[in-house]
Image (cartoon, rainbow, N blue to C red):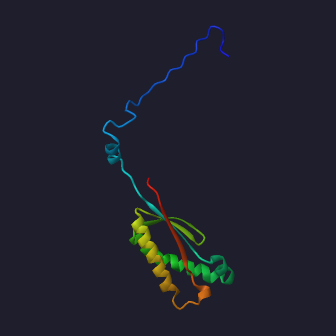
Amino acid sequence: MPLAGAHISARFVVKDKRPILDPRGPARAMASTTRRLPAVLAADIAGYSRLMGADEVGTVRALREHRSAAGPLITQHGGRVVKTIGDGVLIEFGSVVGAVECALGLQRLSAERNAGTPPERRMERRIGITSAMC
């Protein structure tokens, strides 16, 4: 409650004088805005916990070797590893095309590396891709 005789006033200052709507129209406004359509690839190893239970040291070594072999492939398709979590990895790409091509390459690489490996010891990748406009 204000004191007797006190004067209360509110003053609002608007510094941005740009119009709310672009006078050139929505199409021209969108054309001047840079948009990206990045993609995120998420991958992990199917049955990783089972593999760790059977042979922890061998599984960690094999995972390290698989990741090392995948590095150049990821870079070749314009990917950047954002985060690794255990056997999982998140990779960002500038386009969906790069992500899909990389995913196919990763699956081929896994098949090559698993050739001659008993089925119960194979490291098979599960891969998902998502994208959204930024």
Q: Position of residue 65 (x, y in %)?
A: 52, 80
- Viewer-nearest residue: 124 or 15: 124
Q: Is residue 8 visible?
A: yes
Q: Residue at x 32, y 48 (%)?
A: 31
The front one of 130 and 42 is 130
Relative to 100, 62 lies left or right: right
Q: Position of 58 compared to 16: left or right?
A: right
The quadrant holding residue 38 is bottom left
113 relative to 97 in the view: left or right: right
Can you say which quadrant of the picture contains the N terminus?
top right
Percent across and percent down for residue 77 are: 39, 70
Relative to 120, residue 128 above or below: above
Residue in the image at 52% along x and 79% along y:
66
**x 66%, y 9%: residue:** 4
State the image coordinates of residue 23 (x, y, percent, origin top left).
Answer: 32, 35
Q: Residue furthest top?
A: 5
Residue 78 visible? The answer is: no
Location of residue 18 with respect to 93 vertically, above or below: above
Work out whether 18 lies above or below 80.
above
Residue furthest to the bottom: 116
